[in-house]
């Protein structure tokens, strides 16, 4: 429920009092209360380096606000990412079986896939004349952030397609993959286009059925491009002429501001409230061009300094390493084939986030952190399964 509300934000599709109702807060409090009464049923907190880094990252996010230029604005801005990360850590106590991991993947895929499927249909019906937008007041409200989230769900649908026994579910997942790709194109997001390109390459490398993926790509991409209006091609062309693109130059100005601030306030950064006129006047090459970072890397650098950036990068680099470990040790089929496929698809999703996130402010969005959580749990499960099987024990690699 927490993941569904936090990622899909269904209440933001309503109107009146329901739009502002704290549904997620009610679910979080209920979950925490239930934990207190059922402590014996919890899984042990994993002794995984990524899990430990997540704790340090949460603590570090509380350091820079203490030295902010605008301390009066920090608490509300700090609270949002802390809630996301705290509940991710709670998930490590509640998710530990294959069935539970599978359910988490379904919720992640469907929560964003709803917008991907709807957006894909909308793009086809309007021949790409309008952009696809997300729900107001959320991480994925604008066309760019929604597109990246949709791109990240494509590998998750691929995993679900591979491991669903019902043929209609498999066909539904395939349809969702196609419509999500169409929706990403329909967003006219340049960052999502780059993420989709990079992710598609890794999806081909990681997929067990490379022939099918190649055929789908060769058929789908030309068909999608035929639907796209001239405005889409014009927008993609601006990536080659970024010096003449006001939006791109504004982002570069914000990146320099973040760099200069991080160097001046090494290693803590300036807190969450760094996007203010007085801060830009002090650190930006063009103080009048005030924009948010539009990059997960420069956002974390400006807000939390080189210390925060180091923790952030380590979390995702070592999460990739967790996925690689599972792929190595679950390779060869058998009972762990599902873990092999899931780890590979999680890696593909992280590639999309790493590339697309370079141009978008999605540093604290729930989805990538839940993929990190899934990889932590997955490594623990595969390690435990291999240790219980004497004949498989010899295949374990570090």
Image (cartoon, rainbow, N blue to C red):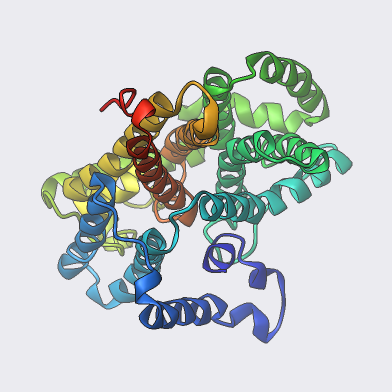
Give the side of residue 163 with respect to residue 222, left or right.
Answer: left
Q: Nearer the viewer, residue 218 or 157?
A: 157
Residue at 61% from the left image edge and 66% from the top image edge: 9
Q: Can residue 284 be seen in this view?
A: no
Q: Is residue 75 visible?
A: yes
Residue at 61% from the left image edge and 56% from the top image edge: 107
Residue extending furthest toward the right: 125
Q: Position of residue 264 (x, y in %)?
A: 12, 49
Residue at 82% from the left image edge and 29% from the top image edge: 227
Q: Position of residue 209 (x, y in %)?
A: 64, 19
Quadrant for residue 123, please give it.
Answer: top right
Q: Where is residue 4 in the image (x, y as percent from the top left)?
A: 59, 63
Residue at 44% from the left image edge and 80% from the top image edge: 34
Q: In this view, does 14 lie above or below 107?
A: below
Q: Position of residue 58 (x, y in %)?
A: 26, 61
Q: Which of 54 and 49 is in front in this view?
A: 49
Q: Nearer the viewer, residue 106 or 66?
A: 106
Q: In this view, does 107 lie above or below 40?
A: above
């Amino acid at each position: 429920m927490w993941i569904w509300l936090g990622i899909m934000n269904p209440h933001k599709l309503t109107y009146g009092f329901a739009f502002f109702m704290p549904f997620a807060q009610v679910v979080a409090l209920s979950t925490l209360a239930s934990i207190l009464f059922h402590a014996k049923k919890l899984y042990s907190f994993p002794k995984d380096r990524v899990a430990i880094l997540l704790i340090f990252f949460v603590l570090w996010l509380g350091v820079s606000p203490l030295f902010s230029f605008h301390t009066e604005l920090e608490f509300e801005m700090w609270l949002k990412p802390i809630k996301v990360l705290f509940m991710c850590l709670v998930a490590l106590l509640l998710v530990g079986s294959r069935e539970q991991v599978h359910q988490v993947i379904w919720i992640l895929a469907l929560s964003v896939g709803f917008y991907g499927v709807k957006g894909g249909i909308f793009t086809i019906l309007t021949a790409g004349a309008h952009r696809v937008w997300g729900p107001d007041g959320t991480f994925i409200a604008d066309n760019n952030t929604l597109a990246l989230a949709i791109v990240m769900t494509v590998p998750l649908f691929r995993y679900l397609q591979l491991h669903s026994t019902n043929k209609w579910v498999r066909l539904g997942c395939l349809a969702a993959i196609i419509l999500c790709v169409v929706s990403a194109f329909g967003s006219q997001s340049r960052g999502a286009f780059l993420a989709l390109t990079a992710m598609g390459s890794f999806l081909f490398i990681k997929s067990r059925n490379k022939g099918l993926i190649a055929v789908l790509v060769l058929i789908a991409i030309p068909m999608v491009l035929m639907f796209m209006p001239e405005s889409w091609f014009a927008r993609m062309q601006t990536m080659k002429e970024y010096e003449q693109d006001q939006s791109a130059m504004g982002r570069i100005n914000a990146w320099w501001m973040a760099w200069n601030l991080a160097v001046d306030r090494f290693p803590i950064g300036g807190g969450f409230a760094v996007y203010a006129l007085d801060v830009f006047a002090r650190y930006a090459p063009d103080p009048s061009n005030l924009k948010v970072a539009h990059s997960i890397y420069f956002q974390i650098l400006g807000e939390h300094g080189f210390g925060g950036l180091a923790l952030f990068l380590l979390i995702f680099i070592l999460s990739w390493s967790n996925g690689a470990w599972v792929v190595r040790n679950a390779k060869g089929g058998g009972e762990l084939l599902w873990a092999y496929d899931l780890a590979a698809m999680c890696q593909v999703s992280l590639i999309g986030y790493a590339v697309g996130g370079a141009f978008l402010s999605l540093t604290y969005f729930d989805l990538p952190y839940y993929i990190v959580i899934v990889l932590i749990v997955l490594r623990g499960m595969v390690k435990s399964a291999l240790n219980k099987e004497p004949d498989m024990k010899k295949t374990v690699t570090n």
